[in-house]
Image: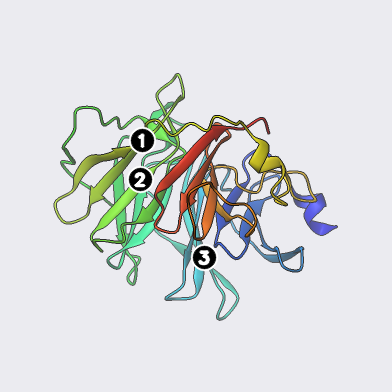
Amino acid sequence: NTFKQDYQYEGTILYNTLNGFFILTGKKSDILYYYNPKYETFDKICKFKYEHDNGCLLLDKEFNRIFAFGGKNTKKCEYYSFADKSINNMPELIIDRANGSFIICNEKIYGFFGFSYKSNKFCENIEYIDLKKLDKWLEVKNIKILDENIKLDIESVSTINYKDDDNKIIIYGGIQGENEDFIIDYYLYDTKDNSLDLINKWENKILKYVGSRWRNSNLSKKDPSGFHFAKNSNFLKLPQKAKIEDYEGDIYLMMDYRNNVHFIDQDKQCIDIFKSDI
């Protein structure tokens, strides 16, 4: 009941752990909940000090805390410590960054792209901070663009660590430019030389049958409170009976910003994609 009272669709942030969801919601996007799919419960974790409308959450398992970064018209950052149940301030971002993506790599937190509502322009940059010290955000200088098709005016992207190289980060999903074109490419960012490359495209992977697997998979379109679980490029594991033809193994679902649904294998490689009617 408390969650239903607090929940606001606009500005809500989801963070998928593959075992459940952290949800930052409320009229000021400052109330943190955890959804447990096994028991179908919404547990209230904390109320942050600042608004994080369309900001970003990031779970830090090493230090047992969860961060809330930026949002519309704000550079504010803070984190909740699960150990002592405290809310702690940390340095502000370099730029007010909404619809960006944050990830931990090599003892640093990296923040990618997004949109600045104060300046009404895309955040075509990357910033980082030391994970342990949390002393100051620094901008990555001289990003090396290795492919002419790479665009930096992107937002609502997702990031994952590259399994074959601890120094690299995969950037995928989201939208590009004022026309909000759907991004179908993987970007690969190398933290060692600050290079940004283009890797395998999702070409010829459109399902001929649209939507039927999604509707018949035991995976509800919406949770009991009425919002999309997998919105904004989050992963959600599909039930065992939801299989893709000619593929065996665990399959995850990703819904991007434009409500296109992607099937992803355990190595985070795209298997199929279709337009959703959700």
CB of mark 3 within 8 Å of CB of mark 2? Answer: no
Q: Is residue 229 left or right of residue 260?
A: right
Provide residue 270's location: percent of width, then percent of height. 42, 45
251 horizontally vs 113: left or right = right
User: Which residue of the protein is positioned furthest toward the top in this rendering?
Assistant: 179
Question: Looking at the picture, how far across and down is residue 79, in whole percent?
Answer: 51, 64
- The numbered disc on residue 66 is 3
Query: The residue under label 3 is which amino acid type?
Result: Ile
Q: Is residue 263 above or below residue 59?
A: above
Q: Is residue 275 above or below residue 169?
A: above
- Point out residue 41 in the picture as x, y percentages from the top left corner: 76, 64
Q: Is residue 58 left or right of residue 24?
A: left
Where's residue 162, x and y in %? 31, 57
Name the residue furthest front. Answer: 246
Q: Which residue is mark 2?
A: 171
Tell me where residue 199 sits by quadrant: top left
Measure how far apart labels 2 and 1 are at the Cα level. 15 Å
Q: Secondary structure at mark 3?
A: strand
Q: Nearer the viewer, mark 2 or mark 1?
A: 2
Give the CA separation, mark 1 to mark 3. Answer: 23 Å
Along the polypeptide, which appears first: circle 3 or circle 2? 3
Identify the residue position indicated by label 1 in the image.
123
Q: From the viewer's side, name the closer residue of 169 and 30.
A: 169
- Write the residue at 21% across / 55% down: 191
